[in-house]
Image (spheres, rainbow, N blue to C red):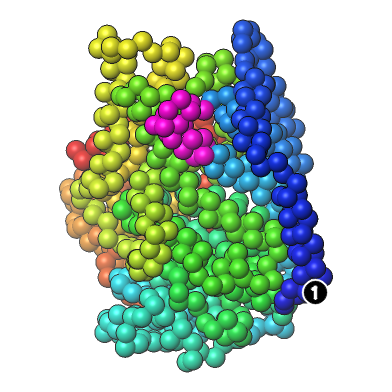
Amino acid sequence: MRRSSLSVEDGLLGLGAASLLGVLLLQLDWRNLWPNVVGLWHSGQATFRVDGTTPEALLMPALVWLAVTFLLKELSPKPTFWSRLIISVGLGVLGIRYELWRLFATLNLDDLLNGSISVALFLAELLTVTNTVAFFFHCIFSIDRSPEADRLSQAVLRGEYVPWVDVILPTYNEGVDILRRSVIACQAMDYPHKRIYLLDDTRRPAVRALAAELGCGYRDRPDNRHAKAGNINHALPSLSGELIAVFDADFMPTRNFLTRTVGFFQDAKTALVQTPQHFFNEDPVAVNLGLEGILSNEQNLFFRFIQPSRDYFDSVVCCGTCFVIRRSALDEIGGIPTDSITEDYMTSIKLQALGYRVKYLNEALSAGMSPETISAYINQRLRWGQGTLQMLFLGGNFLTAPNLGILQRLSHALSLIYWLLSIPRVLFLLVPLAFLIFGLAPLRATINEILYFYVPYYLGNIMAFSWLTEGRRSAFWSDVYETIICFPMALTVVRTLIRPSGKTFKVTPKGVVDPHRIHINWPLISPLLIVAVLTILGLIYRSSSLQDTIVNPDSLAVNMVWSAYNLSLLLICMLVAIDVPQRRFIRFLRREPCELYLGGDRYFGHTVDLSEGGARLMLERCKLSHKVKAVATDSGQFRFCPPSELGDLWLAAELRWYDCKQLMALRQGCDRAVAVGICFVELSLAEQRRLIPYLYCQPGQWDEIRVPEIKTAWAMLQALLRLHPLAESR
């Protein structure tokens, strides 16, 4: 158990350390300090100079490290503790080597302007490399709690430990159809002692009526103070469960969500169990580039890779949904914190400061809606970034909260560093323009030095990132995601540091995508387009006879390659900023035997994909009730046939699309399968209670999609060549 306050020994150690530091400071020769620093810098310049080296020697560090990484990948296709340790140490050494070279051999301090840009660029790279190296070291360690869940869930399944659980769904402006689906999914959970509540923060009669129709509890309040946190806190006095499960209004748990999570609370020190956020629709980056099913959701890296590592350091972040919390522990911290727009993060820190465990079960036991438009995606990230930075100005943050260990604080600090990376990313886009347009030289480096010091770290990072994250992200796609958001996030970072409380909580809109036309997000595209145009003009100027000065050929080559890479990122990000039309309902691949009745004719076949709104069918044979020359009607009955998991379920349906000639051929005895699309008509509540759990609530259905990086790269290239968002507008 952690100590509740600093001990006398801690005070004596701190006093002794301060005294020792004072003695060392007094011993310094302050008059010669700056000359010594300058001398050390010049000595470093000599140490990191590369002159007259052969290509083989220049590339040797890169080739050696790539060989080591390749060998480890072959010996351990799935990373182990030791392979992660070796790669992390190696990349750490290469990163430190690179930054020392940057410090001692590449800064241009000839004048104030060059010096300022040069130092700013060095600090930006230092922050980026520090984050990368810290990320790899942090993720050496990880906890898999699935075996623990297997063991602890036995008491729940046997009925020995089944405390009452209040399942709450805070809602603000989500559509009634979305809420209906979520409530039905919560009611379908296999757990006897549960109560479902809709917490309506906009006091809508339609939501009250929905709660009455579905038989769940309903709570509202007279105002909207403190947004989601205030909504939950207002409902707490009327809830009596020992545990509280929280889901966002668009999230649906699998049937076994509570049986997998409740067992952890047999340990009195467990205050909260967080599970991953999984999304049944693709994020807007994948959709707008046409990479559905190929590019994994951006949040998978955090929820399926980083959070298990944070669990090792007891620094799991509560994510606001898909978690279960002990009611008494929540009362002990005074309810959900309301002084930050990332109230979930503050909840986990307050619990950890009291000595409670916040555990992470890395199983996708629920699914919700990812932001459907790029503007909603950006706004959500801006809120997360601002809320994390806000914590620096609040009491009880991860730096000042009592009882947190040093490793816990360092782990939480990585969250802060991540959001600061937007500023370096902006600099990486703008600094090449200083050379291309104004002839400034913030980076003094030869091609030989780049090959010797930078390429080993860069290639090692690229080769290791996708492998160590088990296919969840590549280094290139990290650059894409950071570039998309860098300009608005950099402004948010600066604004938050100047005025921490300047923005209130804003709900991420769901279910508002336009299904018929593209939407160009000009506020997001504009800065990217301006930088791209300036980069192209700079490249044209420096590669033509228009320039009136003689430039260093190495500097020209380095900046042109750098600018070309920036242009590729900018093009991708501008395409991502164009929202394409999307379907209203998400389709799931389901092959189930079925029958379709049209005008007395009976068609046999199977489903190809299925949604709440309809299905795509492959009809294979037909039994006629009478001989006619045309399809009798577009309306009829659709039936799932045993052994379908849906049993003998009948649904009213209409033909949405079909090929009349092929359907007629099938009716005349053709043995060729015919594809048709149907839509369901006015599903009853009983039908929804069978269809929704089948689509969204089956245990184990939300597995990650992991596609080899080479396939992702090829699909992305195809999307770029066909300008996917613009092609979708035709």
Would you say 692 lies left or right of 601 here? Answer: right
Q: Is residue 111 magenta?
A: yes
Residue 713 location (% of width, % of height): 46, 31
Label 1: few (<14), some (14–19) or many (≥20) C-alpha neighbours in 10 Å: few
Residue 308 image position (x, y, % from top left): 64, 57
Of residue 265 and residue 497, the one placed in the foreground of this image is: 497
The x, y position of residue 212, in whole percent, is: 35, 87
Does 661 sit above or below residue 182? above
Query: Does residue 25 show up?
Result: yes
Which is nearer the eye, 365 or 692?
Answer: 365
Give the quarter of the image for residue 279.
bottom left
From the top left corner, tell me how far across and down residue 694 is, in percent.
47, 65
- Residue extent of the magenta highlight: 107-125
Report the side of 222 relative to 185 (left or right): left
Give the answer, above or below, for where 318 lies relative to 22.
Answer: below
Q: Residue at the location (61% across, 11% down)?
A: 51
* Residue situated in front as seen by the camera: 323 or 312: 312
- Exactly how many numbered labels are in the figure? 1
Is 554 rendered above or below residue 44? above
Residue at 34% across, 28% down: 433
What is the magenta segment's predominant secondary structure? Answer: helix
Decide whether residue 644 is among the magenta residues: no
Tag 1: residue type? Val
**Does residue 62 appear to the left or right of 115 in the view shown?**
right
Residue at 80% x, 62% y is 16
Q: Quadrant of residue 112?
A: top left
Q: Which residue is mark 1?
A: 8
Quarter of the picture containing the C terminus is top left
